[in-house]
Image (spheres, rainbow, N blue to C red):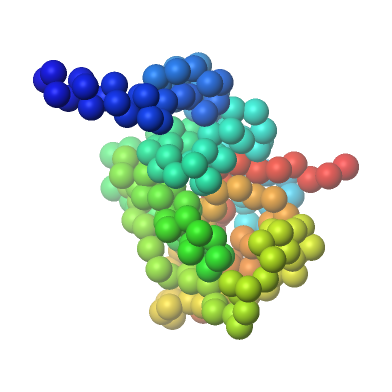
Amino acid sequence: MQAHQLWRELCDLLAPLQCPGCGEGKTQLCSGCQKLLYETPQLVERGLSLRGRHVPVISGGIYHGVRRSVMLEFKNGSRQKLAIPLVEGLRKSLWGPREGRGDYLNIVPVPSSLRGMWNRGYLPALLLATALANTTPAVVWKKLVVPRWRVGIFFRARKASSTRKSRLQRSSGDFRITRRGRGEKVVLLDDVLVTGATIRAAATALMDAGYIVVAVLVVAHVPERG
């Protein structure tokens, strides 16, 4: 026990643990910030219109304040355990009435860009989907949607790969579906909805491959300008 305490004190000295939402010390996430993350999810007004169908988009909340700080620490600070509180609001609202019915949802995480996967070493949307499925009647289809390789993708300037213009140019050709569908219903899951172009491209690729996209889940969204 004494050795364990000494190890914890050494870790606190080298890398002090702080709540990413408010900065409170010695905690992964304080109770106040947890409460803010657990708010009721909301329908994103713009949704998606695909192949003549309206696909609802359900968001855990607006990408600002505590939710934004926690998400940035989860994606860029390598604090992967934050995936659990980030999806808690979605879990409570979406699956509360379904408990005990025995029906499942097929969750398909939207993959990061190849450059993003290379830099982080993990897939944020996959971790979020796994955290959601661990406590809900859901199955994660891990590698159904994968990004296509592009020549020179790792040699472009980092700033150029994340601009709003580049996101809006994404299409279904940016993704590859690893197996054909037979009308299976799936739910797409992504971390943050900004322009909607990435989700639209992934959803279109799935539909072209024979799947039915019934909804999109995002942990946070950026409201439309204007």
Left-right relation of 114 to 158: left
Q: Nearer the viewer, residue 149 or 133?
A: 149
Percent x, y of residue 184: 43, 68
User: Number of labelled discs?
Assistant: 0
Q: Nearer the viewer, residue 176 or 29?
A: 29
Whether residue 11 appears in this view of the structure is yes
Percent x, y of residue 225: 83, 44
Residue 99's place in the image compared with 187, above or below, is above
- Find residue 1 and report its image quarter: top left
Q: Residue furthest bottom?
A: 151
Residue 175's place in the image compared with 101, above or below, is below
Left-right relation of 198 to 77: right
Q: Nearer the viewer, residue 87 or 181?
A: 87
Q: What residue is drawn where x is 65% and y is 28%?
A: 65
Q: What residue is drawn where x is 42% and y is 58%?
A: 121
Left-right relation of 20 to 140: right
Q: Residue furthest right?
A: 226
Q: Nearer the viewer, residue 15 or 175?
A: 15
Whether residue 52 appears in this view of the structure is no
Percent x, y of residue 99: 33, 38
- Find residue 224 and report its image quarter: top right
Q: What residue is drawn where x is 73% and y is 64%?
A: 160
The quadrant the C terminus occupies is top right
Q: What residue is drawn where x is 29% and y is 21%?
A: 9
